[in-house]
Amino acid sequence: MKKENEIHYSEIVKSLKHLAYNLWWSWYPPARTLFDELSPLAWKLSNHNPVAVLAQCSEAELRARLGDEDFRRRVMSVLSSYEGYMSSMPECVKEKFGTRRIGTVAYFCMEFGLHECLPMYSGGLGTLAGDHAKSASDLGIPFVGVGLFYRQGYFQQKVDAAGIQQESYPHLNTGIIPAELVKNPSGKPLFQMVEIGSNKVYFQAWRVTVGRSQIYLLDTDVPQNEELLRGLTAIAYGGDVTTRIRQEIVLGIGGVRLLRALKIEPSVFHINEGHAAFLTLELLREQLKLGKPRSKAEQAVQKQCVFTTHTPVSAGHDRFHRELIEFTLKPQAAAMKLSIDDLMSYGQDPAMDPTVFTMTVLALRLSRAANAVSKKHEEVSHKMWKHLYGKDKTHVAEIGHVTNGVHIQSWIPRSTWEFWERHDSHRWTEHLMDKEYWKHVSDPEVVSDEEIWALRCRLRRELTECIRNKAKEGQVRSGFSGEPSLEHLLSPDVLTIGFARRFAPYKRAPLIFHDITKAYALFNTPDRPLQIIFAGKAHPRDNDGKAYLHKIIEMTHDPRFLGKVIFIENYDIDVARHLVSGCDLWLNAPRRPLEASGTSGEKVIVNCGLNASVLDGWWMEAYNKKNGWAIGDTKVPATPEEQDQSDADFLYRLMHEEILPAFYQRDQKGIPRKWIAHIRNSLRTIIPTFNTHRMLMEYADKYYFPVE
């Protein structure tokens, strides 16, 4: 019997190690809890990495731990759920698109934000890409992602004593991450090559398994390259414009070559933002090599490609001067038997200097369809690119829209998971797009006001204690110092606002402090107190963004706001998960119409949080006057200064007259019924629409599997 148990336990350990390399665990809280239990310290120090945890546990220890009947039962339950997930294929895609040709979607993106232990993302574009991959897995859409392997990530943020952001770039320990090096049949790394100027740049690939989806991340840190080129993919969005174009050549051209080497034949290439648009040139080279006339080759490429644009500001689109295009892409042009003038024509914007090559124009010209990421963004994009269209112009993809969503299960803590599991017998994740279902579960007879309020108080307490712990470790700027002060840092009973975004000036992080006198009155009403938590990074070269961040740090030290204004350093997916679950109100205040979509506010809903946002991006489509609050209206004042003043004044009135009264007006049981009515409206109107399951099905219908 003992020997049989040892064999059985060895199989369980093997299954656990297999699970550790599939990021399915990242959106299944019971799995995360098991790895945490095995080694809480390793779990914490590794940024919640199960591969690192298992590396700290010997086979003997793991088998011994399985001798605990309760622990073994929970391990077996998680493994059973994982095996059931991987072995069953959802029917929704087949049911809806069964008569269409369903093939593999190759999704190219500069970054993928999958989990905090894989810090290869900078912000919203990456987290959206990560959520996209997870929903593709959940829905059974054949999906392969292609990105870059950033050994030093974006950057680690530290705020110094003067309130200035400092950046560092630590190296990732590739030996203990949930990613595996892609190897050839002989067991050696699979190398591919692209020519960039006079250099041959070699790269290998790391495979990240995300449920049923696969993501390949390209890495130039290989022995065949000289030192400068080895560091080409080290840092996300790092270096100068020469580094940027080289990274994008590796991503686009190199990514297609990797898929060919792996014998993956996508039916559609999804170009997620212009960074990846060079993939069209590699597809064009392939078509021209077959002997097709150039016009027919272009049509063949267009048939394979769709493009998503995320940037509502002209200056935000990648542009390269002719000299740099000629220097880096001359080998590609020669392989296609095209002159540099011919190559330039694919990226020339008629409204700009003809010596400038625009990546978005390249994507629009060599894709069959394109989309913006919200209805408003479609309108903005049409205005931005209208000069490309007309009878005398070459083919340019029409721009529609698919509004962004979030992978809801990825943005909840264990407490929220247990709440919905308890109320729906483990089936709520099967109904994320079902409006009737969310209408049902948001009914007071199904989930009471008392239960919703209990969840909110529990999540606020968890956030408060998380931040106090981070303050103890020196990761929080609050104006306090020393452990005795920690008990005064935030209150688990106070209305808590969250603002966590990239610190770009147009996002206006300091808007609530626009009038310091009014802000003081807002934060210090004795019977209606308020506290706010900020997080976010400013790009290392964005001095204006750094100035905004510095202003927030100053507010944390201002005696008038002590303990009520908090800044958390080094914003990442883990910090985001705590904030979107623990905050009562998510504040979003970009200057209109500069928010393409935004998704952070969509993450609070399942945690029974609410939004107060400018009417831009996704919120213009979601807001119905009963499911949150709008800051201002849709009018755009003549100057940014006028918009800032108008929106700040509106925000102060909104807080005093509507938001604070709704939160603090309680009945005899201490329940804020009006506040919870907003929560119920938010659940039923936002969750079924603003999630990546709906988003993926819309992409599949419009772009991935079109009617032929």
Image: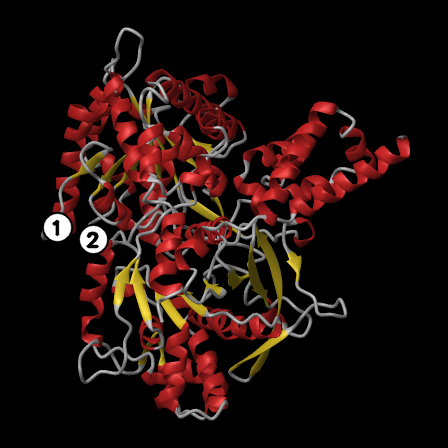
Name the kind of residue labelled 1 in the image.
Val
- In the rendered image, which quarter is residue 492 located in? top left
Q: Residues within 10 Å of mark 2 (few under 14, many from 20)?
A: many
In the image, residue 591 sits, relative to residue 360, either above or below, namely: above
Q: Which of 333 and 540 is in front in this view?
A: 333
Tell me the tag on residue 71. Answer: none
Give the camera-side residue of 88 and 9.
88
Which residue does the image show at 63% across and 36% down from the upper left? 78
Q: How far is disc 1 from disc 2 in space, using C-alphas? A: 8 Å
- For the residue marked with disc 2, what is the amino acid? Pro
For residue 593, the mark is 2
Secondary-structure class at tag 2 = loop
Q: 98 and 297: which one is in front?
A: 98
Expressed as whole percent of the image width and height from the top left, the position of residue 181 reads 67, 61
Instruction: Tell which circle, 1 or 2, labels the residue nearer the N-terminal end.
Output: 2
Image quarter hosting the C terminus: bottom left
Dot 1 corresponds to which residue? 636
Q: Give x and y (percent) for residue 707.
A: 35, 67
